Amino acid sequence: MATEVFPNALADVLAGLQRLIRRRLRSGMSEPPLRGAQVELLRLVAARPGIGVSDAAKELYLAGNSVSTLVNQLGRAGYLLRETDPADRRSARLMPTPAAEARLRDWQERRTALVRAQVARLSEADQVALRAALPALRRLAQNLHEEVEGT
């Protein structure tokens, strides 16, 4: 594959996989689907309960008012709580609700099952190739993260 074609092919495959996984997972949901940014915020708050809106915006590379809008949407849906930060009464801390944690857990379990089943359909050689590619893909993600962070 030509050097200039490979980056585009890689980006297309990665984006396509993510899109297909999201579509398959949405098709089995009984609840209204969440948009990508909503899911990203929920996952971040579940991983870092008590995170502030501005820190969440920075972590997700979104504008603060965009995250505030997402917080309001997810709060109305019963997935996020906004608590006053006792150290700074002007700031809010974000906390996941039990409903959010259950939805994320269900999503993670269904995603794992979906990918496991699809990987199992591949040849042993393809499975080995995918496992071998994981460290390089992680380094690629880390490089992208560092570039955005300016480190």
Image: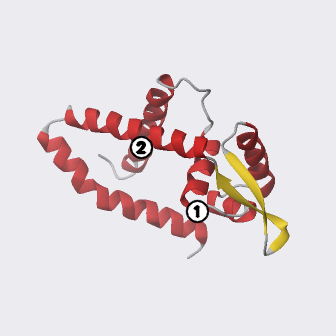
Residue sitting at 22 percent across and 56 percent down?
132
Pick the residue in front: 116 or 19: 116
Q: Position of residue 112 (x, y in %)?
A: 35, 41
> What is the secondary structure assignment of the residue under circle 2?
helix
Relative to residue 122, is residue 135 drawn left or right?
A: right
Q: Position of residue 119 (x, y in %)?
A: 25, 37
Q: Amino acid at mark 1?
A: Arg
Q: Residue furthest front?
A: 98
Q: Position of residue 111 (x, y in %)?
A: 40, 38
* Residue 48: numbered disc: 1
Q: Residue furthest right?
A: 90
Q: CA distance from mark 2 to mark 1?
A: 26 Å
| Residue highlighted by disc 2 | 14
| Residues packed near mark 2 inside 10 Å, few (<14), some (14 to 19) or many (20 plus) | few
Pick the residue in front: 115 or 80: 80
Residue sitting at 69 percent across and 39 percent down?
78
Q: Is residue 140 above or below residue 12?
A: below
Pick the residue in front: 37 or 50: 50
Residue sitting at 12 percent across and 41 percent down?
124
